Amino acid sequence: MSTRMGRNKALLPYRGKRLIDHVAQALIELVGAEHFYVSGDLPGFRSVQDVHRGLGPIGGISSIVHQFRDRWILFLPVDMGSMNSETLNLLFEARDAHLGDQAFHFQGYELPLLLYSGDIVREQIAKLLDPRIHRSKRCIKELERALSCNEVRIKPQSELRFQNLNTPQEWQTFKKEAEISEL
């Protein structure tokens, strides 16, 4: 459950479905249903439980990269309901153009994030989760900095796809803007 939203964002109603269903559709179009998991417990989806509860996204990322080793993993927050496979594919194209690099994200945004779950990434996450590290440093931004994450440029018209929806007000604004963009 999202503290600021006051409810589980995955279950928010959007265009006749749950928000998670829209996010799932974009990912399944890109990677296939057999490779789609959610962090936490959500009926109707295969999931990975957070090993490090209370650490936010970095805790979920840690749980997933340790369960699925030595493969590429795309992390997409549930509250990016208008993200599409065309935009996400830009991360895979960048990966293919920069062989040997470990991480890719869009310029100006921490997520979505494409990571290779090899030793280098797992070691960096372990360093961030060390209890001696201040909680403010246990975040995606620090992981991306430590990995020298590649930044992929986005088209200005794609900005709506990257909105972060944390509060009821942001959710209402997003729904209005999404309706206008469809006209």
Image: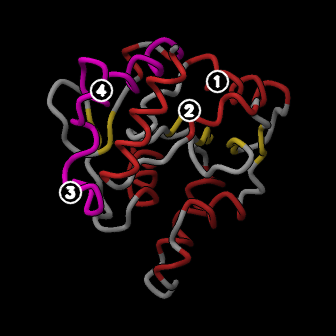
Confirm or deny contact between disc 2 and disc 4 (CB under 8 A).
no
Measured as percent of width and height from the top left, residue 131 is found at 43, 83
Whole-number angstrom distance, CA of label 1 to CA of label 4: 20 Å
Callout 2: helix, strand or loop?
Answer: helix
Whole-number angstrom distance, CA of label 3 to CA of label 1: 29 Å
Whole-number angstrom distance, CA of label 2 to CA of label 3: 22 Å
Whole-number angstrom distance, CA of label 2 to CA of label 4: 14 Å
Confirm or deny contact between disc 2 and disc 1 (CB under 8 A).
yes
Label for residue 87? 1
Callout 3: helix, strand or loop?
Answer: loop
Measured as percent of width and height from the top left, residue 144 is found at 67, 57
Q: Is residue 131 above or below residue 172?
A: below
Task: Based on the picture, tell me whether residue 102 belongs to the magenta stretch.
Answer: no
What amino acid is labelled 3 in the image? Gly
Q: Residue at x 46, y 36 (%)?
A: 80
What amino acid is labelled 4 in the image? Tyr
| Viewer-proximal residue among 32 and 118 | 32
Local crowd size for mark 2, using a 10 Å CA cut-off: few (<14), some (14–19), many (≥20): some
Local crowd size for mark 1, using a 10 Å CA cut-off: few (<14), some (14–19), many (≥20): some
Q: Which residue is mark 3?
A: 6
Label for residue 123? none
Q: Which residue is mark 4?
A: 14
Q: Earlier in the sequence, mark 3 or mark 4?
A: 3
The residue stretch that appears in magenta = 1-30
Tell whether 107 sits left or right of 116: right
Task: Based on the picture, tell me whether residue 10 belongs to the magenta stretch.
Answer: yes
What amino acid is labelled 2 in the image? Arg
Q: Earlier in the sequence, mark 2 or mark 3?
A: 3
Q: Which residue is mark 2?
A: 161
Q: Residue at x 48, y 48 (%)?
A: 164
